[in-house]
């Protein structure tokens, strides 16, 4: 399972160094994650509240390989990876489109399935487990 | 009643044009509003939820008079103004500190007191009315 | 001349009140402006630097009519309006899609054509004047 | 060498889940980095441009240990660490103040000293090397 989301870089994503602010690479990846869940019929806000679910990010790591500028078009691909009954990772790659394409960043996030009411870890609901690729 | 809040401009506030992104002038003003309420003992999140209150912004206007750059120090002053039993405005001025000081922007927001539960306008709770300067 | 840009609302656009942060309505409009210029072949960053041009926003105003939530799909339409030889306005409407559609906000920005080198007002370059609809 | 920077959490930092958006923990850390350099007389924007310097972030990692809410007061401490003649890391800890204090996140960034003109790695200028604690 893999998913791709494309958009332009906007002024709002950048800072006075003229390129995308490092924290906004992570924000871009989260956008792609939300789009991927929506495309799978798991609209994040509705699905999570209907299942008493919070899926906070427990860890992130990022390698910033190339700067991105206003007007650049990027493609963000993501690949979920099951970690345990109640956690999963997502591996993102941000590519700057053009000729040739260049990988601009690699990002990884780890997510923990949590009951909003009980404040403890709970197994992933079946549709989310399926999306993650749990057996 | 007037309140002043000072801080530096950070990279996160700016965009690739090298200066503060226009929408972030409004975000700066909202920070000052939150600090003003906290200083008055009306911590926005706790106070609003304890009073079943939402106070959404219904209108904003801004004049951008001077660019602001990373490292600039700014002072945001604000002056609330009662409009009706269930609404008020806030007038903000953002000043770039230094010699001489220069006004960088004027911003005005209008806020409507709303019951979160009933989804209709309600009078300002007394402590907020006092802060706003209602008679 | 009018242009439409659609996208989902993302977590990044919202705040702890559960809805889009008021300053981010303006950021959404700026995204639509950048997309409109790009669609007209006037990619904002390249075009502006090639023409020694800054087009800062001098004023903005906004009416916030409805909250927007994560997963909502919005359409932002914009209509530029010439003001003078060296300035123009843009009128934006943000619509929450669905049945029925609802207008969520109206935003207006005013832009001033400025020489980056001379720091003074200059006439709009011909392609930008054409986009704005100057006679 | 270590530095501490404190501020409140604002609405702008949070998202519709009611807590600080994960990418904004990194933005908070960058604010602290900018404040630390300014406190050391190395105002980031002026110092970098005077030295033909870019110091992009090449890597980041973060552990998110506790949610942060609007009105929370946090202290961000940072400790730079030399890595090589032209690179350094910064170790950040975000603590939620109160009784008792709780560590909310640990973040690490790696920075590479680069000539803006030559687009290649260059040794850290002496004042920055001193700040980093290079021998």
Image: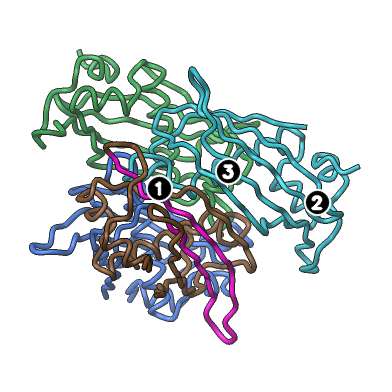
Chain colours: A cyan, B blue, C green, D brown
Residue B66 in percent (x, y) is at 18, 49
Residue sitting at 12 percent across and 62 percent down?
B101
Distance Cα–Cα, label 2 vs label 3: 25 Å
Same chain, marks 1 and 2?
no
Same chain, marks 1 and 3?
no
Foreground tag (1 vs 3):
1
The local crowd at label 1, few if under 14, some if 14 to 19, many if 20 or more residues have their Cα within 10 Å, is: many
**Residue reaching furthest to the right:** A135
Foreground tag (1 vs 2):
1
The local crowd at label 3, few if under 14, some if 14 to 19, many if 20 or more residues have their Cα within 10 Å, is: many
The local crowd at label 2, few if under 14, some if 14 to 19, many if 20 or more residues have their Cα within 10 Å, is: some
Determine whether A135 is above or below C127 in the image: below
Relative depth, front residue between B102 and C45: C45
Is residue B112 visible from the viewing direction of this image?
A: no
Q: Which mark is residue C118?
A: none
Q: Which residue is mark 1?
A: D56
Label 3: chain? C
Residue C12 in percent (x, y) is at 54, 48
Determine whether B6 is above or below C13 in the image: below
Q: Secondary structure at mark 3?
A: loop
Please give the range of residues in magenta.
D88-116
Q: Which residue is mark 3?
A: C10
């Amino acid at each position: 399972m893999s998913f791709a989301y494309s958009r332009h870089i906007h002024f709002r994503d950048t800072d006075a160094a003229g390129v995308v602010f490092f924290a906004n690479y992570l924000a871009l990846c989260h956008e792609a994650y939300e789009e991927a869940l929506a495309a799978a019929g798991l609209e994040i806000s509705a699905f999570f509240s209907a299942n008493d679910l919070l899926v906070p990010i427990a860890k992130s790591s990022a390698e910033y390989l190339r700067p991105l500028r206003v007007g650049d078009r990027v493609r963000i691909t993501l690949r979920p990876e099951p970690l345990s009954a109640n956690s999963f990772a997502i591996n993102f790659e941000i590519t700057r489109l053009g000729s040739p394409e260049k990988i601009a960043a690699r990002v990884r996030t780890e997510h923990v399935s949590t009951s909003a009411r009980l404040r403890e870890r709970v197994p992933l609901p079946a549709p989310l487990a399926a999306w993650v690729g749990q057996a």
